[in-house]
Amino acid sequence: MNQNRVNELFGAGEALRAKGIPLYVQVKKAILASISAGRVLGGDTLPPERDLAKYLDVSRVTVRRAIDELVKEDVLTQRQGAGTFVSERVEQPLNHLRSFTEVMEARGKAITSKWLDRSLGMPHEDECKALKLSAEQEVVRFYRLRYADGKPMALELATIPSNYILNPFAMEGSLYDLLEQQGCRPVRAFQRLRAISIDEQRAQLLDIPELSAVLYIERTAVTQDGTPIEFTRSWFPGDSYDFVAEIHNTI
């Protein structure tokens, strides 16, 4: 990589000699400053560690420690065999009921999916509770890996009572589009969020390390008359999303 380009992005090596501040912290601050200034954008690849070490006149151990810290903070992400990237985060509002397709298309992303399961069956206990079903009422399940611009962005497992969708193969794109076509699109939802460590199988699907922190969301959505129609469980990589909500003072 061209030396001038590295210096432009991360500052000249002689600038990384502030007294009393560890070198790795200075490298870390230089990378953060470049991201904040827009010189390095979400999805951009960082220069190789050896190039950064050479042009910033620090050891590779110093550069690696700075990068490891930023990976832990979800500022950077590493993909085996591909390098280190600036995390490309999606801001997703929590106070609007929108589908994954709608959120990503609003950001100009190309949406694709990999089907993991489409089936008709009897409800599990948690599905009965969320959807207020009897144990004998059938449900359809849609389990898929969602991509945006070719990057794995979410795992979704949606359960719908079969009286709304009987054929699990009737859906190809947006679940909400299909429900809207049938006049039963949900109008509000209750969502429960928590951070969890991802298991090996789901980590492989999302192309992240096992036990990585992910955001797990359970959503129960209802129709205009308050009837539960959707129970969806989603796993989102921690380095890809910022979930935001507008809060009002009710006093």
Image (cartoon, helix red, strand yellow):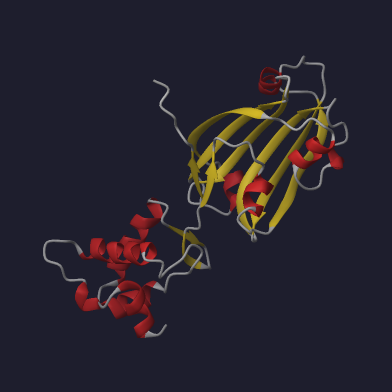
Viewer-proximal residue among 246 and 133: 246
Q: Residue drawn 61% across and 46% down? A: 154
Q: In this view, does 232 lie above or below 24?
A: above
Front position in the image: 143 or 210: 143
Q: Residue furthest front?
A: 251
x then y, percent, for residue 101: 68, 48
Q: Residue at the spot x=11%, y=66% of the render?
A: 19
* Residue 205 seen in this snapshot: no
User: Measured from the top left, where is residue 6 in percent x and y?
Assistant: 36, 78
Task: In the displayed orientation, state which residue is furthest to the left.
Answer: 19
- Looking at the image, residue 232 sits to the left or right of residue 178; the answer is left
Residue at the image point whose x is 86% and y is 41% from the top? 170
What is the total number of numbered labels drawn onto the structure image? 0
User: Where in the figure is residue 112, as x and y percent of width and height?
Assistant: 71, 55
Q: Is residue 247 above or below residue 225?
A: below
In which image quadrant can residue 140 be found?
Answer: top right
Q: In this view, does 131 lie to the left or right of 8?
A: right
Using the image, determine if residue 222 lies above or below residue 20.
above
Image location of residue 22, percent across then percent down: 19, 62
Q: Give 109 or 124, whichever is nearer the viewer.
A: 109
Q: Is residue 153 visible?
A: yes
Q: Does residue 51 sit above or below 30 in this rendering? A: below
Q: Quadrant of the N terminus?
A: bottom left
* Position of the C terminus by quadrant: top left
Residue furthest to the top? 134
Q: In this view, does 40 lie to the left or right of 206?
A: left
